[in-house]
Amino acid sequence: MQIVYHIGANCTDQDRLLKSVLKNAETFAQLGVKVPGPGKYRSLIRETIQSLDGKEPAPDTREILLDAILDDDQCDRLVMSNSRFMCVHKRVLENGIFYGLAEQKLRGLANLFPKDEIEIFLGMRNPATFIPAIFGDSAIDSFSDFMHGTDPLDLRWSDLVTRIRTILPHASLTVWCNEDTPLIWARLIRELAGVDALTKITGGFDLLSAIMSADGMRAFVTYIKANPPQTEQQKRRIIAAFLEKYALEEEVEDEIDIPGWTQDTLSQLTANYEEDIYRIERVEGVNFIGP
């Protein structure tokens, strides 16, 4: 069986991707792909890993989990999503290590299904907005305490990507930039489900409707119907054009209020991020989804 873990990252799509995939649950089930609701597995997976405390699971653990998650149904591919599979927000930089719990948590996730094909999906985000977002949601009052001595300018997603490849060398790893999701939403839905590009889905424009004005969405849908794009690249150009005109500022602009951060800080973080993405695109064994 193929076991798919969408591991976030924290403060990326706020479960919107899972909700879009769930809209297609019946269609995907007919193709052997099960997408259970998060209540079926999030607590169960977390508590099982915690109870094992690094030890190997009992031989029947896999079957017990599958029975609980799938309600005795059968499938070829199981999709599970939780932005906190690796850790809660306040622990992202614990002990000054970016996702320092990745080794423990990812090995735990894989060990639950030792003979299955493991696939990891990870959305990344510009540290210029990612750090303020997770700090804001962390319930930690002091930014210094939250950072645990980490210099924001030293944060690199490529370090985490490389570690994941080392932790789970036989697992496939798919990554993308959260900033690109409006342009690649439909593809992400299909990639998570493991279906081909011609499979009809619903919810391919869910994210657009959340970040674009109602007038803009109506104009976009009218245009798409009258001028069906012939390629994915053409569709992305159309989406980008409508976003430029109709995007809701409060949905696409982040308010950043971090002590000591200046416009130069944000610019340098963004430049570092762009260089880092270039590096990640070239990591062996990584499926990078871009616009």
Image (cartoon, helix red, strand yellow):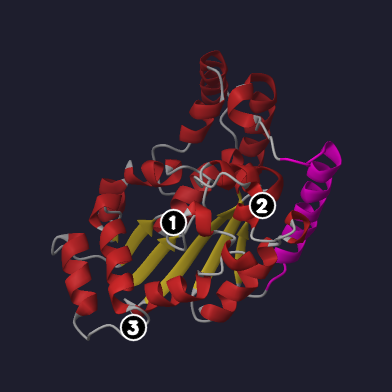
Left or right: where 133 falls relative to 3: right
Query: Could you tell me which secondary element the residue under label 3 belongs to?
Result: loop
Q: Residue at x 56, y 16 (%)?
A: 219
Task: State yes or no: residue 275 in magenta.
Answer: yes
Label 3–label 1 contact, CB within 8 A: no
Percent across and percent down for residue 226 are: 55, 21
Return the mark for residue 144: 2
Which SS type dominates the magenta stretch? helix
Which mark is in front, 3 or 1?
A: 1
Percent across and percent down for residue 276 are: 75, 60
Q: Amino acid at mark 1?
A: Arg
Q: CA distance from mark 3 to mark 1?
A: 24 Å
Name the residue tied to disc 1.
Answer: 84
Name the residue tied to disc 3.
Answer: 115
Left or right: where 278 falls relative to 104: right
Q: Which residues are magenta?
A: 259-283
